[in-house]
């Protein structure tokens, strides 16, 4: 557990030597498991069959634990009661009518914004070469149990229009960051790149049209920026 100290010299007397912003970790008091329950299984794809691998992801908010796997979205109370169970097609596809390669969402990601009490999720619109668009949605509040009320968006997965793979989400006080592995987008040396999208968080949380820095950087496999396109939309 965390043991608070008012002064750093007092903290030095703690049992561990890891100090962070006025807190020491008390190594002699291990944390205990409070609740345990079985999470949801991978659901069926829109095109039929069941997803393998499930590509599990999840996050916890003030009152709920949400898991998103290939094919299914689940919202649980923290005591383990299942509140919402939706297949991925129901979660995503009714909100889009103009996806160039259809809607068969995979590679889900979810994060809870502890600052703003929101949920942010993403998925590819399809697999690999079909994943030319990446889907993004944000909840209107802390309650994740009614996805039909969320705000939904889409962006090209990669700048050359190719398919993407394994998107990742992150956020801070002002921005939401989305990265996508690009499958056929290469730098001048022939190295595959990743696409990075940066979204204005306040605009998305208000349900407004996307306000973003488009493809702020493209990174190659070595983590080096290979292009910058800082146009704001």
Image (cartoon, grey):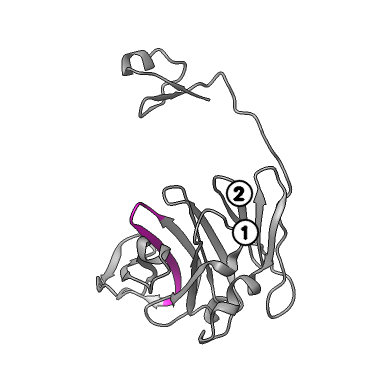
Q: How many marks?
A: 2
- Graded by Cα atoms within 10 Å as few (under 14), some (14 to 19) or many (20 or more), the crowding at tag 2 reads many
In the rendered image, residue 121, in percent from the top left (x then y), is placed at 52, 63
What is the number of the mark on residue 116? none
Looking at the image, tell me whether mark 1 or mark 2 is earlier in sequence order. Answer: 2
In the rendered image, residue 88, in percent from the top left (x then y), is placed at 64, 70
- For the C terminus, the image quarter is bottom left
Residue 61's place in the image compared with 35, above or below, is: below
In the rendered image, residue 107, in percent from the top left (x then y), is placed at 57, 66
Q: CA distance from mark 1 to mark 2?
A: 9 Å
Q: Is residue 143 left or right of residue 14?
A: right
In the rendered image, residue 27, in percent from the top left (x then y), is placed at 53, 21
Residue for point 42% across, 83% down: 161
Secondary structure of the residue carrying tag 1 is loop
Q: Which residue is mark 2?
A: 64
Residue for point 72% across, 49% down: 81
Is 53 contained in the magenta span? Answer: no
Q: Which residues are magenta?
A: 171-184
Main SS type for the magenta part?
strand
Secondary structure of the residue carrying tag 2 is strand
What is the number of the mark on residue 145? 1
Cβ atoms under marks 1 and 2 closer than 8 Å: yes
Q: Tell which of 51 and 81 is nearer to you.
A: 81
Q: Name the quadrant containing residue 205.
A: bottom left
Residue 62's place in the image compared with 12, above or below, is: below
Residue for point 61% across, 49% down: 64
Q: Is residue 135 visible?
A: yes
Is 177 contained in the magenta span? Answer: yes
């Amino acid at each position: 557990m965390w043991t608070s100290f008012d002064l750093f010299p007092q903290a030095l007397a703690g049992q561990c030597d890891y100090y962070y912003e006025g807190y020491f970790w008390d190594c002699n008091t291990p944390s205990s498991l409070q609740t345990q329950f079985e999470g949801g299984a991978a659901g069926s794809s829109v095109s039929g069959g069941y997803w393998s691998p499930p590509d599990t992801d999840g996050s916890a908010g003030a009152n709920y634990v949400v898991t998103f796997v290939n094919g299914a979205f689940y919202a649980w109370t923290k005591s383990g009661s299942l509140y919402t169970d939706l297949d991925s097609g129901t979660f995503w596809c009714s909100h889009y009518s103009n996806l160039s390669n259809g809607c068969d969402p995979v590679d889900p990601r979810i994060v809870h914004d502890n600052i703003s009490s929101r949920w942010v999720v993403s998925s590819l619109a399809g697999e690999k070469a079909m994943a030319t668009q990446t889907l993004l949605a944000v909840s209107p509040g802390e309650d994740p149990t009614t996805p039909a009320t969320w705000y939904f968006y889409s962006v090209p997965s990669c700048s050359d229009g190719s398919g993407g793979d394994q998107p990742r989400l992150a956020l801070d006080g002002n921005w939401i960051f989305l990265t996508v592995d690009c499958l056929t987008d290469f730098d001048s040396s022939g190295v595959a790149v990743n696409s990075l999208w940066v979204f204005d968080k306040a605009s998305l949380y208000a349900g407004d049209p996307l306000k973003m820095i488009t493809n702020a950087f493209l990174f190659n496999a070595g983590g080096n920026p290979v292009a910058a396109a800082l146009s704001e939309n």
